[in-house]
Amino acid sequence: MSTAEKYLKPEVIRQIKRLDLRAQFIVKGFLQGLHASPFHGFSVEFSEHRKYTPGDDPHDIDWLVYAKTDKYYVKKFEAETNITGYLVMDLSRSMGYTYRQELTKFDYAICLAAALCYLMIHQQDPVGLITFDEKIRSSLPPRARRSHLGNVLSVLANLKPEGKTDVAQSLTQVAAMLRHASLVMVFSDLLAEPEPILHALHRLRHGGHDVILFHVLDEAEVKFPFDGMVELEDPEDHQRLQIDATGFRRDYLDEIEAFRETYRRECSQAGIDYVALDTSMQFDRALTEYLVNRRGRG
């Protein structure tokens, strides 16, 4: 089975195609209202034209379109129609974890990234890929060709989430790397101290980038489905801890909710889109719900 097929299995392709159909009416709002963005982006018009507005150069009017529609349209310039996206993927060892779901956090993030890559390329928006653990490990420059989806998936499928992580340092490197205002889509479980990560995210925003943070946790990390005495292992340093899960559950669930709420609140204040996910959520539904919410706020 090829690397692309591994992630774009028939059922996943069907999901992405369904997502694409839904996107016909929701992508328009996906980035259109993002933080009063300077972009007209994500090719929201689904065409190479937009309505003539006062201030446009009359020389840009497409008279062929006028002849057909009796309306004034101007041709768009590439800068108006395209937004450059970067999928920024956490390769840390903890991303390879799953308790009882079919997909690890890393697999789940790849499915989401594939859907976003597919959508953006479908809209002729170039997408690049950056992977990191303690630092940036690989990058693919942005392309808008159809074949690029396979290239992105091939790179991801050949990587193993097995490094230690420094999310903050890696995102700071990303901010220094990007020369033009872009859409930065980060996929991580964020299992590190929030403050330096939030500082790095602020730096990306101050660089003029739009940022969407996909916070991917395993279903067990969110719901804590354990009872009695259990041994838990830290996925990064392999330290083991014996705990009474039943007595610990309430405190744990409060902690995880506070952890997510910190990101939700801080990202909202910084104009960053924060999307809390867990691996039990159907990824196409999760993304569609996000798109709808984004549209509602746009």
Image: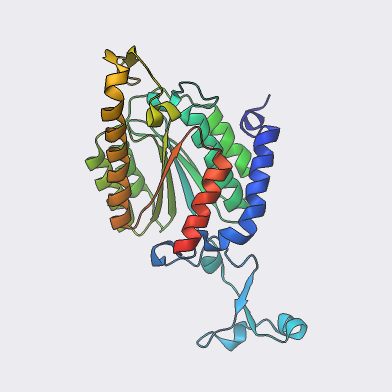
Q: Is residue 56 above or below residue 101?
A: below
Q: Is residue 92 visible?
A: no
Residue depicted at x 46% and y 23% = 98
Expressed as whole percent of the image width and height from the top left, the position of residue 262 reads 27, 44
Nearest the viewer among 131 and 185 is: 185
Q: Relative to residue 245, is residue 134 depicted above or below?
A: below
Against 288, is 114 above or below? above
Task: State the residue at coordinates (72%, 80%).
Answer: 65
Q: Residue at x 53, y 47 (%)?
A: 287
Total count of labels: 0
Residue 164 in picture, x, y percent from top left: 33, 25
Q: Position of residue 83 (x, y in %)?
A: 50, 59
Residue 97, quarter of picture: top left
Residue 237 position in % (x across, y down) = 30, 18
Where residue 269 sits, quadrant-wise, is bottom left
**Of all residues shown, which one is farthest toward the right?**
68
- Residue at the far left: name it: 195
For the N terminus, the quadrant is top right
62 horizontally vs 105: left or right: right
| Residue at (45% x, 24% y) in the render | 96
Q: Report the front residue among 248 and 101.
A: 248
167 on left or right of 6: left
Please state which of residues 122 and 219 is positioned toward the viewer in this rendering: 219
